[in-house]
Amino acid sequence: MKIFVAFLFVHLIAGILCSEATKPKNALHPEVLVESYINMLRALRLYRLDDLGEAVKQAVIDKCKKNGGPKAFDDAKESLLSLQNSIDSLINDTANQVLLVGSESWNAQEQIPRLCDTYMTVLNQTKPALNSVRPCLDEAERASANNAYNMIFVGGDFFCRNNGSNLISFYTARGFECIANLPRRKCSVEMPPRDIPVLTDGVRIAGVPWSYEPSHPSLRECRTLRTIKICTAERLSGCAQPEPANLMNSVFDTTEKAGGCEIKLNAEASSAA
């Protein structure tokens, strides 16, 4: 299973590490940040069943009916689509606002708190939408769903608390310029081998939020998260200022703790010693 948090918690910054070649090189040019922000919102559009075919959709409906009764799927779908409509509206408003303000007049001290306030509002709205799917889930999946949401929330909260002060610090420390200009280099640690199962079960194909692996995040997912943390720190160590690397290291630490990865990885290290 994909690490649900992987495309959300690494959100604003680590997500652009692989796409810098096409981005503006000016540190205080907002397009990179706003594009990443919009991608974060798009990642919270969780319904997505219409893209997966009727067989997958029917498998989800059957699971919801089995676990939560005849109305479980319809209630969940209605809640997720309502959230999706709100997000689509916010995406349009954000893009229009940037065009209205103009990149040259874009002020981080004014605009980042607004973006953060909107994003945290969406994250808070995401919780009841995900809760609407709980009747469809098995008992073990419900605990995994809680862990996944907590990891997403603490990542957003880290950057957006105190009116987005940490994100403003990254932005004004020329973190985006640093990412855009640093040459690619090989990380000192290898990414754990990917486990790519052949999925034949419709519900597992549907994935989050209709299906979660038990004990999410798994030890393998935690190892992957730790590897991304190390490689991000190494990459950002080449920045002129320490804030980008320090902030990213801190958000990884926070997310590892929220998902229980710190405990799992420490236990693995102790048993190997």
Image (cartoon, rainbow, N blue to C red):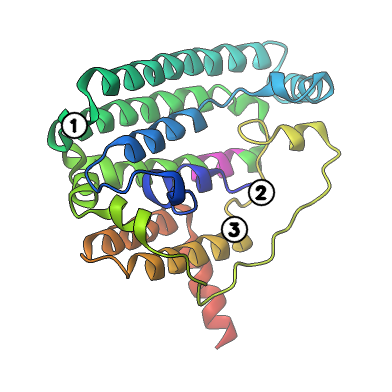
Q: Name above or below for residue 28 compared with residue 131.
A: below
How far apart are the alpha carbons under marks 1 and 2?
Answer: 48 Å
Could you classify mark 3 by the number of other residues whose Cα lies within 10 Å: few (under 14), some (14-19), or many (20 or more)?
many
Expressed as whole percent of the image width and height from the top left, the position of residue 163 reads 17, 37
Q: For the point 60% across and 67% down, which residue is it?
A: 191
Q: Is residue 52 above or below residue 18?
A: above
Mark 1 is surrounded, within 10 Å at the Cα level, by few (under 14), some (14 to 19) or many (20 or more) other residues, namely few
Element marked by disc 1: helix
The amino acid type of the residue labelled 2 equals: Pro
- SS at badge 3: helix
Residue 214 marker = 2
Which contiguous range is marked in magenta?
Answer: 142-147
Residue 263 percent across, percent down from the top left: 47, 66
Q: Nearer the viewer, mark 1 or mark 2?
A: 1
What amino acid type should be assigned to the residue bearing mark 3?
Glu
Identify residue for label 3: 221
Query: Label 1 belongs to which residue?
Result: 104
